[in-house]
C-alpha cells in the first residue's frame, strides 16, 4: 500500500483570505479506493480545502498532485475531466431544467470528452445514474420541484454520471431524513467500489459507518488523522471538536 | 431544452413557418412585401442577438457594432473597390466574426452590469469610428449602393438585387437558413451547454465545462449571425450609414427579442415583425415615434418579461424550442 | 492667438466643463453607490432640467436673472418629482434587479426624450445668462457667468459632501449603501431612502443643466454626451466615491476641454476616451464594479 502513488497528495497547501489562513500548510494523502471523511468544527477550512483540490479556488501556496502529476495550476473544468468531481455543499442544481437534463449535462460532458454524443448513449447514461440514486421515476420533473432530499440525491447523481475517479461530497447528508441517510450510506458504499470518495460530514454516525480513515481539520491545519477508532480515542480531537460541540 | 419525442412536432412547425413566408412573396401587396423583406433580414439580427441574450443569458448593449461590421464589411468594398456581391457578403460576415472574437475575448472578462456597459462602450467606439472615417463612410449621410453595384452575375446573366421579388427571396433564404441553424444549435449539446451556463455557470464549470470558451463561441456565433444580417441589409436595400452603428440599433434587437420571447427560436421573428409594424405605422403619424420603443420596453420588462412566445410556452406549449 | 492665452482659455473652458460634469456624474454615482443600479436615463434628467430652464425663464418677463433664479429653484424640483415617480412606478416594481433596471431606464430614456421632442420641439433654444459681466484675465476678458458656474458647482458639491458625511440623512444613506438587509433590520426605511436618492441624483443632473443652458443651448438630444461622460467619470473615479468622482471629472473635463480646443477632432478624442474607459472596465472590473456581487 505504502509504495502506491496516492490518488491525491497535497504539499504545504495554503490559502489565505486577507489576513485569515483558511488552510494552513496542509500535507495530505488520499489513497485509491478509500472512503475518507474530513471533519472539523465550523470554520476549520474543510470546504476551502476540498475546493482547492477540485480547483474552484486557487491556493496561495503549496502544490496538489493527482496520481503524482502536478495539477496545482490546472483550471477546475480540466480537473473534472481528469476525474475529480465535486458536489456542492449548498445544493447547486439547474432548478429550471428537468431532472433528466440536469444529469444529461454530466453525461454529455463525459461523452464529449470521448468524442460523439448520441441520443442513445446520453439516455442510457442518464438512466443509469438516476437508477443508482433512486430517482429513475422522476426524470421528467423540473429539478426545482424536487424535495430537498431528492435535490441532494440529484446532486450526487450529477457527480456520479461523470464517472469520476474521485468523488468529493460536501456535507451530502445535511437536511436529509433518517431514511434518506440510510439509502445514502448504501449508495456511497456502492460508489466506493469503483471510485475514491472524500466526504465532508457533520453527522458523526455517517462518518463512523462509512469512513475507513478520518482527517480532522482545525484552524486550517490537520489536527489528527486515523481510523474511526483512533479518532474517537484521540483526546486532542475531543477537545477541539467532539467536546466543543457539546459546549 | 427538449426531449427527443417532440422533435418531429417542432421541426414541422419551423418548416411550416418557412413555407408560409415563402408563399407570402406571391400574395402580399407590394408595400407589405417590401416591409416583410426588411423584417426577415432584421429577424436574423434578432436571432443572432437571442442566441447570446436569450440562450446564454448575456445581455449585450452593443450588438449594433456587429450589424454595422457586417454592413460596412460588405458595403465599403462594394462601393470603393467594386467587389462583387457574394465576395462582399462573405467579407461582411468575416468582419463581424473577427470583431466578435476580439470583443468577446475582452468583454467576457466582465459579467452582469459591467458586461452591459462594456459592450455599450465598445459599440460607441464603433459608431464614433464610422463617423471619424467620414472620408470613406460619409458618416450619418451614408453611402448609397446603386443597383448597378448590386447585381448578381449568374453565368453571364446579370440579375439586379433591387428587384423586389428576388430581394424578398434572398431575405427569406437567409432567414430560413439561420432559423434552422438556430433550431439545430439550441437542440445540440452545445445549446444545452449554453442554457445551463445561463442557469448556473459555476455548476457547469464544476461539471467539467470550459464555460469561457462556450461563452466566447456564443459571442462569435451571435456576432456572425448579426453581421450576416447587416451585410444582407446593406446589399439588399442599397444603403450603408452610421445610423446603423448607433446605440439605437443595439437597443432594437433587445426590444424585438423581449417582445417575441427570449430563448425561443421563433420569438425573434414575431417580435421583429410586431415592433417593426408598430414603429412603421406610428412614424407616419408623429416624429416622436421612438416614444413607443420606450413605452414598449418598460411595459415588457414590467408585465411581460417572457415575451409572447415565452408566455405561450410556459402556459400551453412546453415543447416549443 | 499664441500658446499662452490659448492654453489659459482652454483650461478655463475645461474647468467649466469639469464643474458641470462633476455635478452630473455625482448624481449617477450616488444612485449607483446606494442603490446598485445604473440609471441610463440620467442624461435625460439633465436634458429635462435644461428644457425646463428654458420654459421657466421665458415665462418670466423682466430682468433675465429673475427667470434664471426661478429656473434654478423649480426645474430641479420638477425633475426630482419625475425621477421619484419613475422610481415608484417602475424601478421598485422590478425590485431593483440590475439588468431589468437597465432595460427599464433605457425605456425611460426614450420616453423622456421623445416627450421633450413632442412638447418642446427639435430646435435648440438659448437661455439668457442672469448677468453679463466680463472678468479681466491676463490676456483676455472672460465671461463672469462661466466663473459663477464653477463657483456654484463647488458650493453644491460641498453641500452634498456635508449632507453625506455630517448629517443623519447621510448616515442613513451610507448605512443603506453598506448593507441593505441590515439597514432594514435597523428600521431604516430603505424604500424611502431609495426614492430619495434616485430623486436627488436626478436633481443634481438637472441643476447642472440649468447652470449650463446660458452657455450651451437647450436641445432634446443634449442628454447623450453628459450620460456618456458621466459613465466615464464614474468608472474612472470609482463608484460611490465623492472624491474620486470629482477628481475624475476634473481630469476628464480638463482634458476634454484642452484636447478639443487645442489639438484633435472631438470625435477622435471621444473615441479614444471611450475605448480607454472600456479597457479600464475590462481589466480592472473588480475595482469598479467589484462590490456588486454579494
Image (cartoon, rainbow, N blue to C red):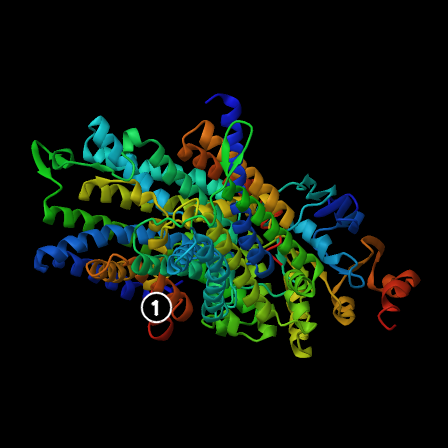
Q: Which residue is mark 1?
A: B319
Taking A11 as reference, is C115 left or right? left
Question: Which quadrant: the C terminus of chain C?
Answer: bottom right
Q: Is residue B10 above or below residue B136?
A: below
Where is residue A203, by image quadrant?
bottom right
Which element is circle 1 on?
A: loop
Residue that appears at 44% across and 59% down: C105
- Residue in front for this viewpoint, C171 or C121: C121
Which is nearer the eye, B227 or C274?
A: C274
Q: Is residue A83 left or right of residue C124?
A: right
Q: Residue furthest right?
A: A235
Give the number of callouts.
1
Quadrant for the N terminus of chain C, please: top left
Residue C111 x %, y %: 36, 61
Residue at the (73%, 43%) spot, across then down = A60
The x, y position of residue A186, in whole percent, is 66, 70
Instruction: Give left or right: position of A35 versus B163.
Output: right
Q: Is residue B261 visible?
A: no
Kindly give the residue lying farthest to the front in the view shown. C62
User: Is B71 above or below relative to B136?
Assistant: below
Mark 1 belongs to chain: B
| Position in image of residue C124 (x %, y %) | 33, 48
The residue nearer to you, when weighing C82 against C13, is C13
> Tag 1: Cα neighbours inside 10 Å, few (<14), some, or many (≥20)?
some
Residue B150 versus residue A143: which sits nearer the camera?
B150
The answer to which image quadrant residue B303 occupies is bottom left
Amino acid at each position: 500500500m505504502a509504495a502506491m502513488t496516492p490518488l491525491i497528495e497535497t504539499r504545504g497547501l495554503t490559502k489565505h483570505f486577507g489576513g485569515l489562513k483558511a488552510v494552513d500548510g496542509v500535507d495530505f494523502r488520499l489513497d485509491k479506493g478509500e472512503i475518507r471523511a474530513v471533519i472539523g468544527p465550523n470554520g476549520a477550512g474543510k470546504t476551502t480545502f476540498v475546493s482547492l483540490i477540485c480547483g474552484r479556488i486557487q491556493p496561495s501556496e503549496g502544490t496538489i498532485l493527482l496520481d503524482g502529476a502536478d495539477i496545482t495550476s490546472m483550471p477546475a473544468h480540466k480537473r473534472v475531466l481528469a476525474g475529480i468531481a465535486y458536489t456542492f455543499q449548498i445544493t447547486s442544481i439547474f432548478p429550471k431544467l428537468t431532472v433528466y437534463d440536469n444529469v444529461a449535462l454530466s453525461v454529455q460532458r463525459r461523452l464529449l470528452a470521448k468524442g460523439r454524443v448520441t441520443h442513445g448513449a446520453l439516455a442510457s447514461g442518464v438512466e443509469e445514474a438516476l437508477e443508482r440514486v433512486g430517482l429513475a421515476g422522476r426524470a421528467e420533473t423540473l429539478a426545482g420541484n424536487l424535495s430537498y432530499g431528492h435535490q441532494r440525491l440529484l446532486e450526487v447523481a450529477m457527480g456520479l454520471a461523470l464517472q469520476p475517479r474521485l468523488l468529493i461530497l460536501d456535507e451530502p447528508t445535511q437536511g436529509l431524513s433518517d431514511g434518506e441517510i440510510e439509502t445514502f450510506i448504501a449508495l456511497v458504499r456502492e460508489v466506493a467500489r469503483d471510485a475514491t470518495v472524500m466526504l465532508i460530514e457533520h453527522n458523526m454516525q455517517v462518518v463512523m459507518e462509512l469512513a475507513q480513515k478520518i482527517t480532522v481539520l482545525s484552524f486550517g491545519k490537520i489536527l489528527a488523522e486515523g481510523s474511526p477508532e483512533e479518532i474517537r480515542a484521540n483526546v486532542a480531537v475531543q477537545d477541539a471538536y467532539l467536546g466543543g460541540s457539546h459546549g | 431544452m427538449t426531449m427527443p419525442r417532440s422533435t418531429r412536432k417542432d421541426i414541422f412547425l419551423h418548416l411550416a413557418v418557412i413555407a408560409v413566408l415563402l408563399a407570402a412573396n406571391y400574395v402580399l401587396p407590394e408595400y407589405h412585401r417590401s416591409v416583410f423583406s426588411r423584417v426577415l433580414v432584421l429577424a436574423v439580427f434578432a436571432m443572432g442577438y437571442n442566441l447570446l441574450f436569450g440562450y446564454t443569458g448575456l445581455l449585450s448593449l452593443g450588438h449594433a457594432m456587429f450589424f454595422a461590421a457586417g454592413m460596412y464589411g460588405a458595403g465599403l468594398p462594394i462601393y470603393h473597390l467594386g467587389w462583387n456581391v457574394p465576395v462582399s457578403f462573405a467579407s461582411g460576415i468575416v468582419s463581424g466574426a473577427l470583431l466578435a472574437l476580439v470583443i468577446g475575448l475582452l468583454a467576457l472578462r466582465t459579467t452582469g452590469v459591467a458586461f452591459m456597459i462594456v459592450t455599450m462602450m465598445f459599440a460607441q467606439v464603433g459608431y464614433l469610428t464610422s463617423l471619424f472615417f467620414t472620408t470613406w463612410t460619409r458618416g450619418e449621410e451614408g453611402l448609397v449602393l446603386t443597383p448597378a453595384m448590386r447585381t448578381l452575375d449568374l453565368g453571364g446573366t446579370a440579375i439586379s438585387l433591387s428587384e423586389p421579388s428576388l430581394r424578398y427571396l434572398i431575405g427569406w433564404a437567409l432567414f430560413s437558413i439561420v432559423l434552422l441553424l438556430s433550431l439545430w444549435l439550441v437542440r445540440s449539446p452545445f445549446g444545452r451547454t449554453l442554457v445551463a451556463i445561463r442557469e448556473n455557470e459555476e455548476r457547469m464549470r464544476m461539471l467539467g465545462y470550459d464555460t469561457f470558451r462556450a461563452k466566447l463561441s456564443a459571442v462569435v456565433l451571435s456576432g456572425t449571425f448579426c453581421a450576416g444580417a447587416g451585410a444582407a441589409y446593406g446589399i439588399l436595400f442599397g444603403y450603408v450609414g452610421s445610423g446603423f452603428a448607433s446605440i439605437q440599433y443595439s437597443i432594437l434587437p433587445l426590444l424585438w427579442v423581449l417582445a417575441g420571447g427570449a430563448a425561443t427560436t421563433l420569438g425573434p421573428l414575431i417580435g421583429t415583425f410586431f415592433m417593426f409594424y408598430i414603429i412603421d405605422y406610428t412614424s407616419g403619424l408623429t416624429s416622436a415615434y421612438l416614444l413607443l420603443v420606450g413605452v414598449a420596453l418598460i411595459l415588457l420588462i414590467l408585465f411581460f418579461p417572457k415575451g409572447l412566445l415565452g408566455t405561450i410556452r410556459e402556459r400551453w406549449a412546453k415543447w416549443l424550442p | 492667438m499664441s500658446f499662452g492665452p490659448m492654453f489659459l482659455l482652454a483650461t478655463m473652458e475645461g474647468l467649466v466643463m469639469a464643474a458641470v460634469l462633476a455635478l452630473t456624474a455625482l448624481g449617477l454615482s450616488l444612485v449607483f453607490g446606494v442603490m446598485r443600479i445604473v440609471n441610463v436615463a440620467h442624461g435625460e434628467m439633465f436634458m429635462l432640467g435644461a428644457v425646463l430652464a428654458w420654459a421657466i425663464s421665458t415665462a418670466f418677463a423682466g430682468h433675465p436673472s429673475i427667470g434664471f433664479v426661478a429656473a434654478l429653484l423649480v426645474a430641479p424640483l420638477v425633475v426630482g418629482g419625475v425621477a421619484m415617480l419613475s422610481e415608484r412606478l417602475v424601478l421598485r416594481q422590478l425590485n431593483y434587479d440590475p439588468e431589468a433596471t437597465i432595460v427599464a431606464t433605457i425605456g425611460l430614456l426614450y420616453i423622456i426624450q421623445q416627450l421633450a421632442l413632442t412638447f418642446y420641439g427639435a430646435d435648440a433654444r438659448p437661455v439668457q445668462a442672469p448677468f453679463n459681466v466680463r472678468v479681466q484675465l491676463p490676456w483676455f476678458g472672460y465671461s463672469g457667468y462661466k466663473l459663477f458656474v464653477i463657483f456654484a458647482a463647488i458650493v453644491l458639491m460641498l453641500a452634498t459632501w456635508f449632507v453625506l458625511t455630517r448629517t443623519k440623512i447621510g448616515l442613513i444613506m451610507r448605512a443603506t449603501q453598506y448593507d441593505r438587509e441590515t439597514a432594514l433590520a435597523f428600521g431604516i426605511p430603505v424604500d424611502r431612502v431609495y426614492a430619495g436618492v434616485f430623486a436627488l441624483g436626478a436633481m443634481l443632473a438637472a441643476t447642472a443643466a440649468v447652470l449650463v443652458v446660458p452657455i450651451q443651448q437647450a436641445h432634446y438630444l443634449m442628454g447623450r454626451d453628459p450620460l456618456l461622460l458621466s459613465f466615464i467619470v464614474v468608472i474612472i473615479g470609482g463608484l460611490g466615491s465623492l472624491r474620486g468622482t470629482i477628481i475624475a471629472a476634473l481630469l476628464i473635463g480638463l482634458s476634454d476641454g484642452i484636447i478639443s480646443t487645442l489639438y484633435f477632432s472631438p470625435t477622435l478624442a471621444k473615441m479614444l476616451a471611450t475605448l480607454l474607459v472600456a479597457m479600464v472596465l475590462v481589466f480592472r472590473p473588480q475595482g469598479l464594479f467589484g462590490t456588486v456581487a454579494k
